[in-house]
């Protein structure tokens, strides 16, 4: 976490030619935050939202870099939520075989998850992040300043990913998160929790940067969550989809691995109170299962691979589930 992100940025940009620095952001962040224009570098504003995380947007970034004669020594600063840092990271990793990339996450979700860990990508043919790279940024500048303008729905979305991290980490972090007053999210109270989630993610990523083992645990909740997000055609915030996915995958953790029921019941209460029920019909199960069979985490065609929990702090990766088990978990979620 930076005490002052502008100071931290100044010391990083000092080692680059100022003519070789550009900023990529979204129109919404640019409009909401005058700091972006005040940096004084050329700015590309992209259309935000999950549908904007496309190959066409990647091409816009490549064109912008070429138009500004950015060389391999250039620096791209990406200021935005996870959609933008994923997209910008991908464009930076492929332009001239890779230029320096500095994400400045402006949403809670991007701070605790998307902008940490080096995964980049965009959506293609309706599938989430199906084209992407692993690419390490120069640094990730996390600052709570951005959260002051973030709508409550986006704070709740980020909190969804924090819940996932806590379930992977420990009972202690889980109970600290549950104590947060979600009706009045206090940024000062959030800061140590953001730090704890980032530390947990960094430790997992450092032990397995390319997701051949333990890092798969970070996908907890995402096999079901991504299918819902894809089905909503980008309308459902990512962290909401993760909360619904966590409920389905905690249900399977209880039925398949005898995980204690308490976290499932606690999360269900939170969902009903703050997130609302997922807007899907039972008749859509088969479509959701087909989307799960296309998930990039699967190692064999048409299988469904999940991370489940034996207990809080003890994830079990590579759990193959059958279509019948997936259907049962969807039915549980939609029955709540
Ligand atoms: N790379 C990874 O490891 C990883 C991990 C988790 C999620 N993700 C990706 O992250 C994306 C979701 O990220 P997100 O939830 O940040 O969504 P987002 O980037 O779409 O941002 C959400 C909304 O908040 C607005 N916004 C952003 N910052 C703001 C600010 N400071 N003030 C006011 N409004 C602001 C944006 O304009 C947008 O409307 C998904 O595409 C998901 O796949 C990636």
Image: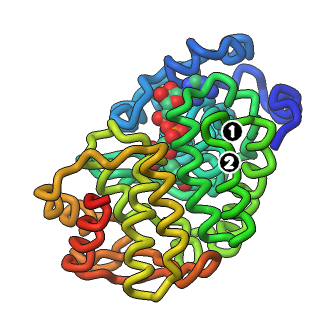
**What is the quadrant of the N terminus in the image?**
top right
**What is the quadrant of the C terminus in the image?**
bottom left
Q: Which residue is drawn at 60% across and 81% down?
A: 314
Residue 209's mark? none
* Nearer-the-camera pick, 71 or 27: 27
Query: Circle 2 sits in a helix, a strand or a loop, which is it?
Result: loop
Whether label 2 touches label 1, CB < 8 Å = yes
For mark 2, does the 10 Å Cα neighbourhood hold few (<14), some (14 to 19), or many (20 or more) residues? many
232 is higher (above) or lower (below) than 263 = above
Q: Disc 1 beta carbon < 8 A from ligand 1?
A: no
45 is higher (above) or lower (below) than 130 = above
* Nearer-the-camera pick, 178 or 143: 178
Question: Residue 181's x, y, as percent?
Answer: 67, 43
Residue 71 visible in this rendered orientation of the protein: no
Count of marks placed on residues = 2
**Could you tell whether 197 is left or right of 283 in the image?**
right
Query: Circle 1 sits in a helix, a strand or a loop, which is it?
Result: strand
Residue 249, quarter of picture = bottom left
105 is higher (above) or lower (below) than 288 = above
Question: Residue 272's x, y, as percent?
Answer: 42, 50
Residue corresponding to mark 1: 102
Q: Distance between the residues labelled 2 and 1?
A: 6 Å
Q: Residue at x 26, y 65 (%)?
A: 330
Question: Residue 266's x, y, as percent?
Answer: 53, 63
Residue corresponding to mark 2: 137
In terms of sequence position, does the residue under pointer 2 or pointer 1 come before the other? 1
Question: Residue 279's x, y, as percent?
Answer: 26, 45
Q: Residue at x 69, y 25 (%)?
A: 148
Residue 291, quarter of picture = bottom left
């Amino acid at each position: 976490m930076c005490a002052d992100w502008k100071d931290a940025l100044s010391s990083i940009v000092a080692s680059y030619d100022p003519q070789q620095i550009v900023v990529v952001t979204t129109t919404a962040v640019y409009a909401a935050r005058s700091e972006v224009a005040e940096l004084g570098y050329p700015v590309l504003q992209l259309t935000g939202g999950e549908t904007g995380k496309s190959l066409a947007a990647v091409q816009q970034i490549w064109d912008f870099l070429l138009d500004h004669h950015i060389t391999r020594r250039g620096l791209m600063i990406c200021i935005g939520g996870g959609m933008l840092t994923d997209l910008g990271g991908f464009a930076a990793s492929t332009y001239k075989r890779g230029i320096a990339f500095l994400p400045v996450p402006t949403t809670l979700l991007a701070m605790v998850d998307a902008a940490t860990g080096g995964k980049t990508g965009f959506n293609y043919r309706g599938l989430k992040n199906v084209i992407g790279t692993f690419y390490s940024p120069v640094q990730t500048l996390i600052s709570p300043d951005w959260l002051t303008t973030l709508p409550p729905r986006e704070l709740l979305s980020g909190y969804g990913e924090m819940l996932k991290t806590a379930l992977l980490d420990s009972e202690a972090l889980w109970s600290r998160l549950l104590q947060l007053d979600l009706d009045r999210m206090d940024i000062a109270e959030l800061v140590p929790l953001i730090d704890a989630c980032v530390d947990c993610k960094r430790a997992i990523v450092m032990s397995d940067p390319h997701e051949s083992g333990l890092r798969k645990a970070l996908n907890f909740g995402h096999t079901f969550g991504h299918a819902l997000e894809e089905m909503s055609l980008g309308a459902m915030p990512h962290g909401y989809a993760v909360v619904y996915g966590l409920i389905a995958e905690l249900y399977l953790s209880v039925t398949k691995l005898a995980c204690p029921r308490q976290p499932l019941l606690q999360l269900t209460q939170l969902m009903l109170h703050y997130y609302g029920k997922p807007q899907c019909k039972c008749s859509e199960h088969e479509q959701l299962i087909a989307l799960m069979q296309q998930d990039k985490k699967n190692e064999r065609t048409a299988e469904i691979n999940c991370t489940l929990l034996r207990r809080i702090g003890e994830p079990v990766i590579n759990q193959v589930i059958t279509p019948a088990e997936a259907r049962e978990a969807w039915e549980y979620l939609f029955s709540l």
